[in-house]
Image (spheres, helix red, strand yellow):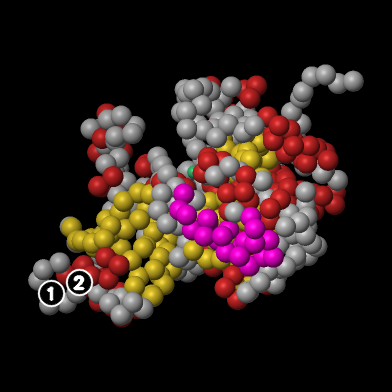
Amino acid sequence: MKLNYKKEDVYSRLSEQEIESATKYTDEYINFINTAKTEYLCVEEAVKMLEENGFVEFSKKETLKAGDKVYFINREKSLFAAVIGSEDLSHGMNIIGAHIDSPRLDLKPFPLTERDNIAVLKTQYYGGIKKYQWLSIPLAMHGVIYNENGEKIVISVGEENDDTCFTIADLLPHLAREQLKANADKFINPEKMSVIVGNIKEKDVKENPVKSNILKILNQKYGIKEIDFARSEISLVPAFKAKYIGFDKALIGGYGQDDRVCSYATLKALIDTSSKIQRKTNIALIVDKEEIGSVGNTSMNSRVFDLFVEKLIQKSDTKNVTELEVYYNSKMLSADVTAGVNPDYEEVQDMQNASIIGSGVSVEKYGGSGGKYNSSDANARYVAEVMRIFDSNKVGYQVGTLGKVEMGGGGTIAYILANKGVEVVDCGTPVLAMHSTFEVTSKFDVYMTYMAYKAFFEN
Ligand code: MN
Ligand code: MN
């Protein structure tokens, strides 16, 4: 009998065929993150995936029966999908929830200005970034503008190889002596993160001729005026593509893997388990605004999900159950990434309790920081249940914590559902360089994330 616990890597345990399935999965995943670089684009891609697999828009179904597949879009930026199970809702639902917003640079309401013959767009960062990582890299622009008539204009520039792109020019080291004396969290002034968009003067214009020329181009291309920026949501994200890393191609590098790696796995798991009627009603949540504290009507904290559950009850044949009773009997995996051990920075981890890259999807009983403040600390009985599901389905998983106590910390959406009474535990992919412009994951952890969510939905 083996008494001690030892972490095992996933790859060594996989058969040739499983390795092939993992590769097929991660090839598709890489395509997904190359396309879905904002929450708007994620929702669009999710709808495509769901509709191809027989899901219909929620309002199109008056009543719901076992096997029915529906999705609900909340203001273009978050999405709930459900597959109705054979048990009625009073027995609770199986929920997996991930987020589709990632750290990025947003444009200010009046972003366009000109200095020294260069037209720039002023930005404000979204989410927790190390600002220097966003300088001197190619940036792509994605977003929506609503004009004075309320018509939607979509902007997407910088993704194709022959497309133009944008950048923030960092200061040259030759003249950075003063700048580099400042603290690392101070040395990049967020007001100096202006994105270069042009350098040509409009003929016969005296004041701000470069800005004027850019406005002319924007008007020709999109029919917009300067005021229209005030009714837009436009973001800048890294323009480079996600790709495999390493001579053995065991890792994946790409922007926005927090938390689109878990979002994609959640959607795929829901779709792939929907061809058979499952016992529980399975719910996939991909929500917005996690990176800024889950606030606002597209975030998990919004009561729009309560509305969705209320409607689910009304449309099912279980009328005599309340929303709160459904929550009380529901179970959830909070699908969000965690920190994998970075070999250059082992000192921030308690190595005995850290998530190792390549050792599988990570289960985290609690997050938060210091004395577990603000963390959803999962119940031991529920952790045991989830571990049992993973063990019996040969899911490669590990149990971890997010760094040493008092080293920092982080949260997920787990507490929000836990506050409603749902049993929740965090379960997601370990990541290196989280929140950077090129986050790193293990191909096998990515695949095991999907396998874990699939096993959970089949339970
Ligand atoms: Mn996250
Ligand atoms: Mn994050």
Find the magenta span and give its range: 301-321
Q: Nearer the viewer, residue 43 or 324?
A: 324
Q: Is residue 319 magenta?
A: yes
Q: Nearer the viewer, residue 389 or 92?
A: 92
- State which quadrant residue 84 falls in: bottom right
- Across and down, in percent, residue 94 comes to 68, 50
Q: Nearer the viewer, residue 64 or 13?
A: 64
> Residue visible at 35% across and 56% down?
106
Quadrant of image for the N terminus: top right
Q: Identity of the amino acid at label 2?
A: Ser
> Residue visible at 47% across and 32% down?
374
- Is residue 330 visible to the viewer in this orientation of the structure? yes
Residue where numbered disc 1 is placed? 205
- Across and down, in percent, residue 454 comes to 74, 51
Q: Nearer the viewer, mark 2 or mark 1?
A: 2
Residue where numbered disc 2 is placed? 212
